[in-house]
Image: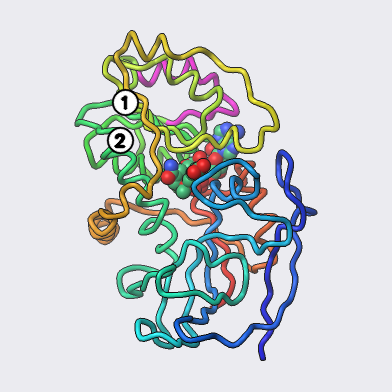
Amino acid sequence: MSVNKQIIMKTRPEGMPKLENFEIIENNIPDIRHGEVLIKILWLSLDPYMRGRMSKAKSYAASLNEGDVIIGGAVGRVIKSETNEYKEGDIVEGFTLGWQAYAITTPASIRKINPDLAPIQTAVGVLGMPGMTAFFGLLYVGKPIPGDTVVVSAASGAVGQLVGQIAKIAGCHVVGIAGGKEKCDFLLNTLNFDAAIDYKNQNVDNMLDKYCPNGVNVYFDNVGGSITDSVINKLANYARVAVCGVISQYNLTAPEPGLRTHRAILTNQATTEGFLVFQFAQKYHIAIERMAKWIKEGKIIYKEDVVEGLENAPDAFIGLMNGKNFGKLLIKVSE
Ligand code: NAP
Ligand code: FER
């Protein structure tokens, strides 16, 4: 019987997660039963929404309890199957495989990945949940039209980097907001954004005035908080605000006071729409095909931030909450 390594939520984080909230444990891997597959985890996807699972707040995903293995998306290889659908060697992606070296699951919780389409870890990146979020959030919620000014926050991250590139393909003027010069240089020089605002070192209001002289037509919001207050005050008539994420709020222990933005929404006849990517699940195949084509044509590139070793997932996750990641954050667990 082989031994599994698992990372559990030892104690529930309050505010910013700390290393002491996590613990690595070892357990024997039980025999699989009829209808189950045993998966060797190759890549973990670390995503901001996972902070929500660690709290007790109501969410689409069940909260973790203390002692539970951290649940999250991963890519792995089937090493044993007691199903008709999967065989040894298949590469799969699942949203609930979790922070462990091996996972036992059922066909309903995984999907098969075509390793010839792109590197397999893209199944949790550009061709997976973050990629779907960027594609549908921008095109279906933000509804850009050529010539629009599109602003995206957390612009160098897994979702943001793709939002900006898709907006360029759609013929828009793209302004990214990110923390630090290195990330902003990447947006300008590698992704060909039209402008980049370093919110840690520049005045966001002044820079928005400079780069969005006709106002903001589409705001793809990944962060919430004061950055969003600034952008809302620059909306153009009939602007669309796609509320994708509010990472600046995920680790707060008390609500943060903010500006009252409804007047700007009213007077600009703007639309603010929150969305969860899962509402587009029936259409994912459209986006996967389109994005894979754009990657092959060199119209979209994707930057990954790879951390080696399951045991480093907690530290990397804390980094994600603090802007230490540069691109889609992945843990490489095994070859
Ligand atoms: P990511 O952008 O790769 O990483 C998170 C980034 O957020 C950090 O690198 C950091 O970048 C920025 N950040 C952290 N704290 C911040 C703060 N206080 N103020 C401003 N920026 C801060 O993560 P991602 O996977 O692409 O996710 C981005 C957002 O999309 C998250 O809010 C996530 O919850 C949301 N999301 C939503 C859906 C959905 O279905 N609605 C799906 C996927 C993701 P900087 O260095 O630039 O600060
Ligand atoms: C995310 C942020 C929030 C996300 C999902 C949610 C899949 C959902 C939150 C909820 O249901 O409470 O990044 O990504």
- Establish if 301 lies above or below 86: above
Identify which residue is drawn at 59% across, 26% down. 201
Most distant residue in the bottom direction: 1
Residue picked out by circle 2: 141
Residue picked out by circle 1: 240
Label 2 CB sits under 8 Å from any ligand 1 atom:
no
What kind of residue is marked 2? Answer: Val
The quadrant holding residue 35 is: bottom left
SS at mark 2 in the image = helix
Q: Which residues are magenta?
A: 196-212
Name which of mark 1 and mark 2 comes first in the sequence: 2
Q: Residues within 10 Å of mark 2 (few under 14, many from 20)?
A: many
What kind of residue is marked 1? Answer: Arg
Is 252 a magenta residue?
Answer: no
**Disc 1 + disc 2, Cβ < 8 Å:** yes
Query: Residue 223 placed where, x, y %?
Result: 51, 33
